[in-house]
Amino acid sequence: MVEAREQLEKLLKRGVSDILAASELADKDPARPEYHFHSPSQWMDDPNGIIYHKEYYHMMYSLNPNTSKHRAGMVYKTAHRIWDPNHEDWTGGITVWGHARSKDLVHWEHLPIALYPIIEKGEHFIWFGTTALNENGTPIAIYTSVGPEKRPEDTTDQWLWFGDDDLITWKPAEENPVLDYDVHGGEVLTEWRDPFVVKHEGKGYLILGAKRIGKDKNDAVIALYEARNPEYTKWSYKGVIFSLDNESVPSCECPNLVKIQDKWVILLSPHGAVEYYIGDMDFENARFAVESNGVVDFSTNFYATNVLEDAKGRKIMWGAVEGFQNTNGWNGCVSLPRQLEISDDGHLIQCPVEELKMLRKEKEVFSGTLEPGINRELFRLESGTAEVKLHIKQDGIIKILLPCNEKIEIVIAKDSICAGDKSAVLEKKEKRVLNIYLDKTVIEIFLPDGTCLTSVLSEPLTGGKVEIIAEQGKSYIEAEAYNLNCTDLFSKELFC
C-alpha cells in the first residue's frame, strides 16, 4: 500500500507536465474534434461541476492527467473488476477535475486542475459531481470520492470542497465526508454516487443515484437530501423520489433535476441511452410524479449529462461524448451545449445554443428534387467541420455521403435515421427539419422532435464533396450549409 501511494503521488505531481506534453500530440491528431469542448489532452469524459458564475460558463470534467489510453476511475467497469491499488487498473492513472471557462460557450480558457484526490485520506478517484453556490454565496463542489477502501458497490461517500470567488483555488471542507452511508439509517442503497445540487424555495437539496436493495425487489433509484446548514456540509436524508423499477439496471447514474418552465425534469444515465422524465416535484414529501418521459440521445456515445442556468435563464446541458478509437494524445470530448425547453405537448426539446452560429463561414445553399439513383453535390466540406440545416419533404430514403477514408453515410428513412453505426427513431412526417453538426470524428444531429443522435466515427471526416442521393422515391430538399472557423477556440495560457 505504501509503494502504491508513493507511485500515485508521483502521478499527481507529474500530471500538469504530462498534459502539456500530450497536448502537442493531441493538437496534431486529425481525428480530434475541433469545436466540441475538450481538455488540453489525455483521457477526459464526464462534464462534472458546471456553473455560470460572474459572467463565465465554467466547465469541470473528469480527467486522467497521466495518459490518453486509460479510463482512470472506472475500475469497476473493466473486465478485471479488481479493487487492488497495485493492479494496473489503479496505477494506470488517477481522476481529477479539469477546469475551463468561457464567456460565449465557443471560446474556452483552460484553467489549472480544480480538484485532486487526497491520497493520504484514501481518495484515488474524484468522480462525477456538481458545482453550485451555497446559501452563503460561496462556490462549492460536491463529488463522489472513491479509493481502495471506497468501492462504488458499497462504501463510497460524498466530499465537498470550497472555492474562491473566481473558482480558481479550491480547498476541501474539514467536515469531509459530508455524506456517508449512515445518513440512510436502515435503508440499503448501493452504487451510491453522482451528487447534483438543486435549489428550491430558499432551500438547498441534493440528489444521488443508487441501487436500492429491498426485501421484495431491487431497483435503480434517485434519492433526495436536504441541506441542514448554509454551508452545505450537513445533510439529512429525505427519501427516494424516483425508481426505474427495473432490476436489470445497475443504478441511476449522473442524475440531474432541473426546473424548466413550470415543470421539473429528471435526466439520468441508466447504463444505456440517456433518458428524461418530466413531472411535478414535491420536495417536502420526497416525491416525483412522472407525466411524460423519453430519450434524450439515442446513442450510447452520449452519456453523463450536467445542466446549468445562465444569466438569461436558459437551462443548458452537456454530456460526455465517448467511444473514440486510435486517438493520439487525447480521448473524449463533450457534446455541444444544448438549450432545454419543454414542448406544448409536454416533452423535452433540445436546441443548439445560438452562440454556435459565430463559428459559421459563408453560407452555401442547395435546393431541388432528388431523383432516385442520381448523386447531387450538397456542398463542399473544407476540413471536416460543418453545420448543415436540412428542410426535407420526403418520399423514400435519403442518403448523405460524407468524405472520409472509409464509407460514412447519414441515412434518413421515413421512420429512422442512421449516422455511422448509430441510429435513432424519427416521427413519420412528410416534412421535417434536421440540424447536423460535423466535427472530424463526431456527428451530432438535432432531430425534429427535440431528441438528438450522437455518433463517434472510427475515421475522421476530410475535405471534399458532400453528396446527397434519393432511394425508393423522390424527395425535395432545401439546405443551408456552413463550413466552420475553428481556429483559436482553446487557450492554454492560464492552464499552469
Image (spheres, helix red, strand yellow):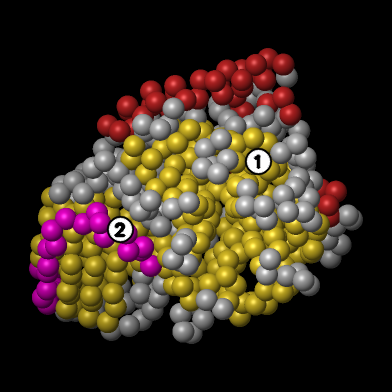
Q: Give the x, y percent position of residue 210.
A: 71, 55
Residue to which mark 2 is pinned: 356
> Label 2, label 1: how many angstroms apart (C-alpha)?
32 Å
Q: Give the x, y percent position of residue 267.
A: 57, 64
- How many numbered discs, if any? 2
Range of magenta residues: 351-374
- Image point 58% across, 66% down: which residue? 258
Q: Is residue 10 above or below residue 107?
A: above
Which mark is on residue 161?
A: 1
SS at badge 2: helix
Q: Answer whether residue 352 is visible to the viewer in this image.
A: yes
Q: Toward which corner of the image does residue 126 lie, by quadrant?
A: top right
- Image point 50% across, 52% down: which residue? 53
Q: Is residue 130 above or below residue 288?
A: above
The residue carrying pointer 2 sits among few (fewer than 14), some (14 to 19) or many (20 or more) residues within 10 Å by Cα, namely: some
Q: Amino acid at mark 2?
A: Leu
SS at badge 1: strand
Q: Answer whether residue 249 is visible to the viewer in this image.
A: no
